[in-house]
Image (tube, rainbow, N blue to C red):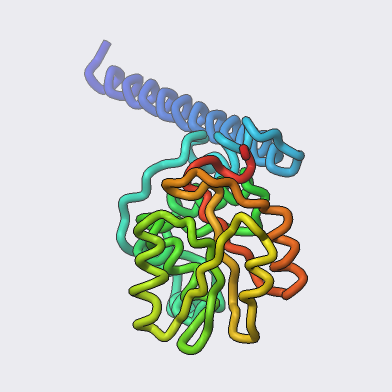
Amino acid sequence: MSKSKKSFFKRIFKNNEKNDQQKNLTDQNKDNLERNERLTNVSERKLGFDTLQVHAGQTPDPVTGARAVPIYQTTSYVFKDTAQAEGRFALTDAGNIYSRLTNPTTDAFEQRVAALEGGSAGLATASGAAAITYAIQNIASAGDEIVSASTLYGGTYHLFAETLPKFGINTIFVDPDDPENFRKAITDKTKALFIETLGNPGINVIDFDAVGKIAAENKIPLIVDSTFPALKIS
């Protein structure tokens, strides 16, 4: 066989191989899309607690079909145009700006916890102390008060008794064994009631229903530090 004929057939074989590879990729992408659609539709059904633990807050990757939540190590994100960037920074367009504000991995975690707890949304913080501080400062400012159980973890007690007063937020501590003590301490300045699922270190258990009812009657939130068991489990 001449050299030119060999070159000709070689090109044909390469083209056929390339076409087969493209077909395989097309079939694979089609399979991924179909699989993703099936898995995504799972979220439309009422899922059990066990399923929510591993799937809530995340849909399969549309390109690879990967099921697990990836760890996004990016610090920043790309905007498709200046209009989108403007909307993101104006908070009129929901989406990622910087990882110090939002991150897809963290977002999946927040959605999963909210689903497990039956909440409307979640917010992940670096520590429990940060979570408590965020919760209080979100609803109280200088001149406001919170009513708290006196049987608190030492760090939280110090936050309420020493740190928050520097911001003008006063805490009234009450004996939680009698839920009516919370009602008696409420004033027109009260922004929240605060308790723990289990007092630390006393391991005392508060009557959640009674304190919750008092909070609802006065139209103020009840904040619960659930350090030990999750509320869904407890």
Q: Nearer the viewer, residue 131 or 147?
A: 147
Q: Which of the 4 image quarters holds residue 195?
A: bottom right
Inspect this view and state whether residue 98 appears.
no
Q: How many marks?
A: 0
Inspect this view and state whether residue 81 appears.
yes
* Residue at the farthest left position: 3
Could you tell me which quadrant the C terminus lies in?
A: top right
Query: In the image, 113: left or right of 101?
Result: right
Q: Nearer the viewer, residue 205 or 99?
A: 205
Could you tell me which quadrant the N terminus lies in?
A: top left
Residue 19 in the image: x percent, y percent?
A: 46, 29
Residue placed at 70% from the left, 40% from the top? 41
* Residue at the farthest top position: 1
**Residue 173 against residue 122 in the figure, above or below:** below
**Residue 127 against residue 2 in the figure, above or below:** below
Q: Nearer the viewer, residue 79 or 53?
A: 53
Query: In the image, 81: left or right of 49?
Result: left
**Residue 74 against residue 22 in the figure, above or below:** below
Residue 10 in the image: x percent, y percent?
A: 32, 21
